[in-house]
Amino acid sequence: MRSTYLIVLTIVIVATAAPTLAEQYPSKPIRLLIPSPPGGGTDTLGRILKEGFTERWGQPVIVDNRGGASGRIAAAAAAKATPDGHTLFFTYGGVLTTGLPLFRKLPYHPIDDFAPVAMVAHVPGILVAHPSFAAKTVAEIIKLAKARPGALTPGTSSIGSSSHLNMELFKQMARIDVLQVSYPGDAPALVALLGGHVQFAFNNAVVALPHIQSGKLRAIAVATSTRTPNLPDIPTIAESGLPGYEGLLFYVLVAPAKTPPAVVMTLNEAVKQIKQTAAVKQLFSTLGAVSIDMTPEELRVFLQRELQKWTKVIQTGGIQPE
């Protein structure tokens, strides 16, 4: 009789532990690791979550900016943190989907050492050109490149960046030979494009939109699977002759592996609610960011798929980090 009572008591404790944990969360300040210095796009979006969590729960959220090493410093710190939901990692997707094939070895596994929490947003990549560039469509770029192998000079911000890998994917799918010119960061690459020193490039919407609107750059196509709200008349690359093309710059929230599922779901719901506020919707619109909601499991599948995709692109291109 006593053993039966203990079994029943154990079942009750286990059944009620997860809801209790979720109800008590957060029980202390949250540390939000961000793999970039203050002021950049990743930091700006991360601080939206900081403010939203603070307002929602009343607990301090401490932003810990750890730039450098292509996000590996911040990612390693997050992976090794106590998995109780009080250390979180807000990052651009490349840290989890391109770092491993680029650097071959990391102090963490980008999938196994994290619990996916929430997709926050995509920032569309846009294929843009200097107004003097002869090609005005994807088909015309491909035709020019095939007629003059190695003669076209697209610009990229750095080896392994989204602008570089989007162009590499474009090259591979179009089966063309172009000479990518790499610059040490987004700003120098943009200056080179605006000055006509390179002919075309992939820029994210935040950078490109003001120059498209002013006429200093010409939008050719968007790298997303569907057209973007800010440029409804600009076709996707997929519908312009390269079916299946999609190059994503995205931002996600993850936690250390083994973070309790109840806490993960609490965080996932909080992120969705924060993105529904009028102020955040307006900021996303200004930044050119597109809000995307995923369950933690959907996000895990997405990250695994993106890791496989970019591993193939990097290996096929023989890309080495700088």
Image: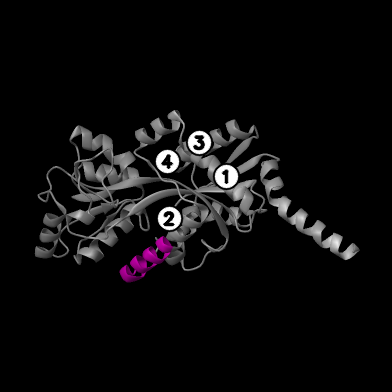
Name the residue carrying label 2.
94
Seen at 25% across and 52% down, the residue is 155
3D distance between C-alphas at marks 3 and 4 = 18 Å
Q: Mark 4 and mark 3 in contact (Cβ < 8 Å)?
A: no
- In the image, what residue type sits under mark 4? Gly
- 282 left or right of 115 in image: left
- In the image, what residue type sits under mark 2? Gly
Name the residue carrying label 3.
274
3D distance between C-alphas at marks 2 and 4 = 14 Å
Looking at the image, which is closer to me, 71 or 198? 71
At label 1, counting other C-alpha atoms closer than 10 Å, the crowd grade (few under 14, some 14-19, many 20 or more) is: many
Looking at the image, which is closer to me, 238 or 98? 238
- One can see residue 33 in this view: no
**Up-down relation of residue 32 to residue 114 (above or below):** above
Dot 4 or dot 1: first in sequence order is 4
**Up-down relation of residue 260 to residue 107 (above or below):** above
Q: Which residues are magenta?
A: 305-318
- In the image, what residue type sits under mark 3? Ile
Image location (x, y in percent) of residue 167:
27, 57
Dot 3 or dot 2: first in sequence order is 2
Mark 4 or 1: the one toward you = 1
Dot 3 or dot 4: first in sequence order is 4
Mark 2 or 1: the one toward you = 1
Dot 2 or dot 1: first in sequence order is 2
Name the residue carrying label 4.
41
Name the chief secondary structure element in magenta.
helix
3D distance between C-alphas at marks 4 and 1 = 22 Å
